[in-house]
Image (cartoon, rainbow, N blue to C red):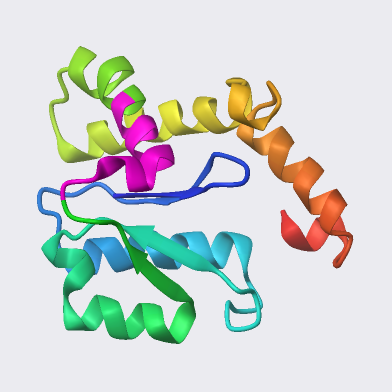
C-alpha cells in the first residue's frame, strides 16, 4: 500500500504486509496524514483517490476516509484514473521488488524503505519540473505561504 502526494509525487505513507486488508490501508493513510497534516485534515481539503479493491470499499475504510478527507474511487478497470500511484508501483516492482530475494518481511520492508527514501530525495521527476519529490514539496510549501516551512516538514 502506498500513498502519493500527486502535486509533488512524494510517497507520504506506505505499508507492506502479507495481506492487503483494510487495516493495512488505513495504516498507510494514517502515516500520510500524520506526516503532512499533523494538525488534522478536516480543513485541508484533501482528496484521496483509490481503486475499487475490497480494502478501499470496506465500510470501515469509507467511514474513516469520510471523517478525514474526500474519498474518490477510480472507475472499474481504469488504472489511468490513478496514474501517479500506478506508475510509482510499477517502478517499485521493476527496480526493487522483482530484482530482490527477500528472506523475511522485515528485510523486504527495510529494503523498500531505502528505495522509497531514494525515490523521494534523490530521483528527479519530469512531472514536477525535474526536481525530486522532496524538492517539489519544499517549493510547494513555500508557494503555499500559509504556514512556516518548519511546520510542514
The structure residue drawn at horizontal position 64% and vertical position 74%, both measured from the top left corner, is 44
Q: Where is residue 34 in the image (x, y as percent from the top left)?
A: 54, 67
The structure residue drawn at horizontal position 49% and vertical position 67%, both measured from the top left corner, is 47
Q: Nearer the viewer, residue 12 or 114?
A: 12
Quadrant hosting residue 22: bottom left
Residue 153 horizontal side relative to residue 93, left or right: right
Q: Which of 115 and 4 is in front in this view?
A: 4
User: Is 122 placed above or below 149 here?
Assistant: above
Residue 125 visible somewhere in the drawing: no
Q: Which of 119 and 9 is in front in this view?
A: 9
User: Is 92 placed above or below 6 here?
Assistant: above
Residue 135 horizontal side relative to residue 60, left or right: right
The verdict on residue 87 being magenta is: yes
Q: Where is residue 151 in the image (x, y as percent from the top left)?
A: 78, 63
Quadrant hosting residue 93: top left
The verdict on residue 147 being magenta is: no
Q: What stretch is highlighted in magenta?
A: 77-90
Q: Which of 143 and 16 is in front in this view?
A: 143
Residue 60 horizontal side relative to residue 129, left or right: left
The structure residue drawn at horizontal position 15% and vertical position 18%, both measured from the top left corner, is 101
Residue 143 visible somewhere in the drawing: yes
Q: Where is residue 107 in the image (x, y as percent from the top left)?
A: 25, 32
Quadrant hosting residue 94: top left
Amino acid at each position: 500500500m502506498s500513498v502519493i502526494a500527486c502535486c509533488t509525487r512524494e510517497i507520504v505513507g506506505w505499508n507492506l504486509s502479507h495481506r492487503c486488508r483494510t487495516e493495512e490501508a488505513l495504516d498507510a493513510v494514517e502515516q500520510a496524514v500524520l506526516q503532512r497534516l499533523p494538525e488534522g485534515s478536516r480543513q485541508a481539503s484533501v482528496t484521496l483517490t483509490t481503486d475499487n479493491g475490497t480494502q478501499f470499499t470496506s465500510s470501515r475504510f469509507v467511514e474513516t476516509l469520510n471523517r478525514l478527507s474526500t474519498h474518490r474511487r477510480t472507475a472499474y478497470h481504469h488504472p489511468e484514473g490513478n496514474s501517479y500511484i500506478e506508475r510509482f508501483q510499477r517502478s517499485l516492482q521493476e527496480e526493487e521488488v522483482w530484482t530482490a530475494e527477500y528472506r523475511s518481511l522485515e528485510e523486504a520492508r527495510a529494503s523498500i524503505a531505502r528505495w522509497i527514501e531514494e525515490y523521494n530525495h534523490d530521483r528527479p521527476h519530469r512531472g514536477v519540473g525535474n526536481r525530486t519529490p522532496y524538492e517539489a514539496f519544499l517549493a510547494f510549501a513555500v508557494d503555499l505561504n500559509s504556514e512556516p516551512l518548519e511546520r510542514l516538514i
